[in-house]
Amino acid sequence: MPLIDIRDLRVSFGEGVGAIRAVDAVSITIEEGEVYGLVGESGCGKSTLLRALAGLNPNWSGAMTVAGQILGPRRSTAQYKLMQMVFQDPYGSLHPRHTIDGLLAEPLAIHAIGESDRRIVEALDRVGLDASFRFRYPHQLSGGQRQRVAIARALIVEPRVLLLDEPTSALDVSIQAEVLNLLDDLRRSQKLTYLFVSHDLAVVTHMCRRIGVMRAGRLLEEMTVDALLAGGTTHPYTRHLYRASAGYDRRLADTAEVLDDSDEEIA
């Protein structure tokens, strides 16, 4: 049985003829210990799917199961503990008026987990920050350090799943590599499962074994990273996305509008 099983997930915003279907009948399964990458252009529904799975958006239909537990629009405290989310913007996701100590103590209090002093120091150490960071404020940290704190906050309640929403896209390239390597090490040492959302195929191919490609709310294609690198894509949009990840190409730019306007080719 997969650790995460998403079936026919639909998420809409608005009502009636003006409703926007942000996620349209998406089904995904993820095995325990796996890093599954969800890729696609901005606005394709990746983050919306993640937020529905995390319990941050209750307005969805379909079926979702994690670790054998059926998830509904409302979650128990134990179900929230099972999955934690790391957001794209490490500064926006950390309260600017709370110290790092307060930010890490809050989830422990919510989940009634004791020994907060020990757990906070251990959580910081786990992400490569020493105890001197404990009483600093987010504005006193670099972007990479803030994202490490965000990861520590997610891990401090000992979840089984991390939902990663573009966790390195707001960081400099050199810092991106450090954070990706940290996430890889943590997955192994903490026996975690990741659902990794990104628009950057280079990041996804580094982290993931399997990927799903989304466009306009739909899951167009699933494949292994090995198949992607070997040119084994079956959908024209995936090929377009893969070529674009290699850098600017004038011929690719000239064909982009044709690809966007071809409903038959994309559907």
Image (spheres, rainbow, N blue to C red):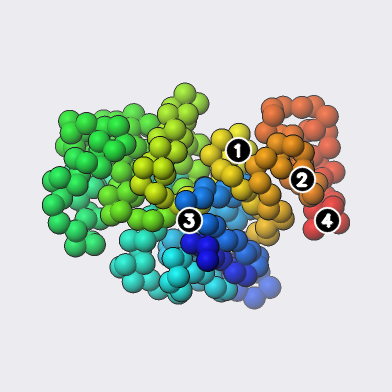
Q: Find the distance from the CA under tag 4 to the CA under tag 1.
A: 28 Å
For label 4, the residue is 263
Disc 2 residue type? Thr
Q: Is residue 48 visible?
A: no
Residue 205 circle label: 1
For marks 4 and 1, give the one nearer the viewer. Answer: 1
Q: Is residue 28 visible?
A: yes
- The local secondary structure at tag 2 comes to loop
- The local secondary structure at tag 1 comes to helix
Marks 4 and 1, the one that precedes in the sequence: 1
Marks 2 and 4, the one that precedes in the sequence: 2
Q: Quadrant of the C terminus?
A: bottom right
- The local secondary structure at tag 4 comes to helix
Residue 109 at x, y = what percent? 19, 58
Residue 213 at x, y = what percent? 67, 50
Label count reads 4
For label 2, the residue is 233
For marks 3 and 4, give the one nearer the viewer. Answer: 3
Marks 3 and 2, the one that precedes in the sequence: 3
